[in-house]
Image: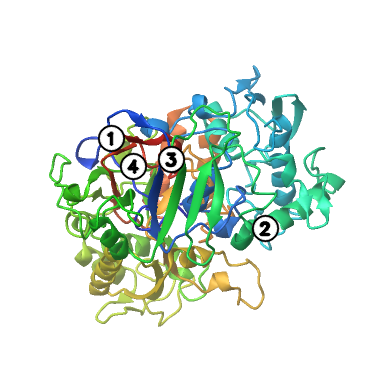
């Protein structure tokens, strides 16, 4: 993420409260692998599968260079079925790279770790041209151009790509930390500004790259010249690339033009787009006949069916897995699953309808976004004591046991605890997140200058001293803020209502407003710092809850530069902390795990974005359909792995 997102791939980005939910599953009591073998008989060639989309969360963008507004796992998963990233991650519930399914071969580093070479395999675009190193250079030219603060089309100079992280006082990030590159046939060599942790550079920098075909080097006027040359600041290549970026961004947003487009019809993945209904969000994909990658599609067509709510989706499932309008892959809403036993088992409510039940894990964690630049409430959000009090009003375990019926677990920090890895700090394993304690939250607010005799509480002791409300908090400030949340899943309504009720007992009033998943993400924009009128729309939201949090994609090594780095593209809440920036910079350069642990612990303790429990999505698939995995760990559907059996 990013958040499913903005999970994502913000996110990731980062997704919604059901099939695109930013979920994780752990071994033992937290979950199992999430694999569902389904049909075990002989493979049947062909067949059509209908898949339920997340409620009110259809794809909104097709160009695999998502800008901040469209930076989500929904769009990333949609794109990656057709346009393969340079490196593939998340196979078999493993967040590490899968070189077998990657177009890029193992990176080769120089002795001083200041340059790295990537050689591409002999893949083909569907128009017959090779996927080569120049296609990677094309991506780099676009990225370099949009990241240039002198020419950036983003008013806040954050670059067009949602994964972009601007430089801090101590560190450059991708692509700014790439001084130059050279192309020779199938090999591209990146020359870096300094030595980096190899694992971080692969998982967070090279992972961002999606090769771009020559067919995309175009503007409304025709052929451009962005794919060749080097996009240095002020160069003709940069000028051309900015025009290409503007054109592809517009075309990528125009869902009505996707099918039949000479741009988006050129694919290198196992699938190509057959149809897309811009009104409903329904779409169909069919095999790419020219695909020469490792796993070719067995099915003849996959239809993604938009749903208005999880209740409507479940109604379809209850009619069975066969028939022209049936769903073969869907999800069981939390209000309809059976209670999960301590050993992780449960009774499948759809067995008689011909479905197999299994959890679907994702590598991420769950939170809601708060806005440190909110004109109404930003000064309060900046107070750590308030964020601690707010966290103490979230009954994570109660939500898991009640609303989620055991299908989830309390979020323990900013580094995922599934799958088990050495990336989780010892401190996070002891769950340092403040426990549910409404009385404690109320007392903490009282100790810091708030009159909690009524809700919302009022600041009666402004100032920055001990026992006062804190910097920027005005006398008479009310503890009342607005939260916009993604509707479509019944459990989400219950969850935010429960949070609102518990927060009110501590003196915090939360005013709720529902919106679609895409609508919430669309409002997740930063305030433009320095706007003299103070009327930029991004300043006017307080908190956003898209039903999940963050999936670590395309930045997979959980170092936090996209989320919490000052001015990072996915840091729409505009959190800024020089010490956090220093810890992030150290974690990407050092191979010492303690550097990552230091960031992990500080980010968790700061409660930059308060945590909600992490839900475990429950997948339902037809019993005669072999679904080895609905998606990989980063929420990319993998229908090329599916097939009917007999």
- Mark nearest the camera among 2 and 3 is 3
Dot 4 or dot 3, earlier in sequence: 4
Q: Which residue is mark 2?
A: 251
Dot 4 or dot 1, earlier in sequence: 1
- Mark nearest the camera among 4 and 3 is 3
Residue at mark 2 to residue at mark 3: CA–CA distance: 26 Å
Around disc 4, counting alpha carbons within 10 Å, would you say few (fewer than 14), some (14 to 19), or many (20 or more)? many
Residue at mark 2 to residue at mark 4: CA–CA distance: 33 Å
Q: How is the image coloured?
A: rainbow
Q: Which residue is mark 1?
A: 39
Figure check: 251 above or below 89: below
The spot of residue 202 in percent (x, y) is 56, 31
Q: Secondary structure at mark 3?
A: helix
Q: Which residue is mark 4?
A: 361
Pointers 2 and 3 in contact (C-beta within 8 Å): no
Relative depth, front residue between 356 and 158: 356
The spot of residue 74 in percent (x, y) is 47, 53
The spot of residue 134 in percent (x, y) is 74, 33
**From the viewer's perspective, is 453 left or right of 174?**
left
């Amino acid at each position: 993420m990013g958040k499913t997102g903005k999970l994502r791939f913000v996110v990731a980005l980062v997704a919604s409260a059901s099939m695109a939910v930013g979920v994780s599953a752990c071994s033992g009591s937290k979950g199992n692998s999430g694999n569902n073998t389904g049909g075990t008989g002989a493979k049947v060639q062909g067949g059509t599968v209908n898949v339920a989309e997340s409620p009110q969360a259809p794809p909104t963008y097709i160009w695999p260079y998502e800008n901040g507004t469209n930076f989500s796992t929904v769009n990333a998963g949609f794109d990656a079925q057709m346009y393969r990233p340079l490196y593939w991650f998340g196979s078999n519930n493993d967040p590490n790279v899968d070189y077998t399914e990657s177009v890029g071969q193992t990176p080769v580093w120089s002795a001083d770790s200041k340059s790295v070479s990537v050689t591409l395999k002999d893949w083909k675009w569907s128009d017959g041209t090779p996927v080569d190193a120049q296609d990677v250079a094309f991506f780099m030219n676009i990225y370099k151009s949009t990241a240039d603060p002198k020419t950036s089309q983003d008013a806040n100079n954050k670059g067009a790509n949602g994964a972009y992280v601007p430089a801090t006082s101590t560190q450059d990030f991708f692509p700014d930390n790439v001084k130059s590159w050279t192309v020779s046939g199938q090999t591209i060599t990146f020359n870096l500004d300094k030595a980096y942790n190899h694992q971080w550079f692969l998982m967070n920098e090279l992972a961002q790259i999606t090769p771009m075909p020559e067919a995309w080097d175009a503007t409304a006027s025709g052929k451009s010249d962005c794919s060749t040359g080097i996009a240095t600041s002020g160069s003709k290549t940069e000028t051309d690339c900015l025009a290409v970026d503007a054109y592809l961004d517009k075309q990528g947003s125009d869902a009505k033009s996707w099918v039949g487009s000479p741009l988006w019809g050129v694919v290198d993945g196992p699938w190509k787009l057959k149809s897309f209904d811009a009104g409903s969000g329904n779409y169909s994909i069919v095999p790419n006949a020219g695909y020469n990658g490792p796993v070719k599609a067995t099915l003849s067509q996959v239809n993604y069916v938009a749903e208005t709510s999880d209740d409507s989706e479940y109604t379809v499932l209850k009619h069975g897995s066969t028939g022209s309008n049936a769903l073969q892959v869907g999800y069981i809403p939390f209000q309809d699953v059976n209670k999960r036993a301590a050993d992780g088992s449960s009774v499948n409510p759809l067995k008689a309808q011909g479905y197999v039940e299994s959890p679907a894990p994702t590598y991420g964690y769950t939170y809601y976004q708060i806005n440190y630049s909110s004109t109404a409430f930003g000064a309060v959000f900046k107070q750590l004591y308030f964020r601690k009090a707010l966290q103490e009003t979230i009954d994570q375990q109660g939500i898991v046991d009640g609303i989620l019926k055991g299908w989830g677990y309390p979020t323990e920090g900013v580094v995922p605890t599934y799958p088990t890895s050495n990336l989780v700090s010892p401190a996070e394993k002891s769950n340092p997140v403040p426990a549910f304690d409404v009385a404690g939250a109320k007392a903490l607010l009282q100790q810091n200058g708030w009159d909690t005799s009524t809700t919302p509480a009022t600041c009666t002791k402004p100032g920055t001293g001990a026992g006062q409300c804190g910097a920027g908090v005005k006398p008479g400030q009310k503890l009342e803020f607005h939260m916009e949340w993604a509707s479509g899943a019944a459990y989400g309504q219950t969850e935010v209502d429960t949070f609102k009720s518990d927060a009110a007992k501590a003196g915090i009033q939360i005013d709720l407003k529902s919106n679609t998943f895409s609508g919430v993400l669309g409002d997740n924009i930063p305030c433009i710092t320095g706007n003299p009128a103070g009327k930029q729309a991004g300043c006017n939201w307080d908190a956003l809850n898209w039903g999940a949090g963050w999936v670590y994609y395309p930045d997979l090594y959980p170092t936090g530069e996209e989320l919490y780095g000052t001015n990072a593209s996915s840091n729409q809440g505009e959190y800024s902390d020089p010490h956090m920036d220093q810890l992030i910079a150290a974690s990407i350069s050092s191979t010492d795990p303690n550097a990552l642990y230091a960031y992990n612990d500080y980010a968790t303790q700061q409660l930059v974005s308060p945590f909600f429990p992490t839900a475990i999505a429950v997948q339902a698939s037809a019993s005669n359909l072999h679904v080895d995995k609905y998606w990989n760990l980063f929420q990319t559907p993998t229908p090329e792995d599916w097939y009917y059996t007999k």
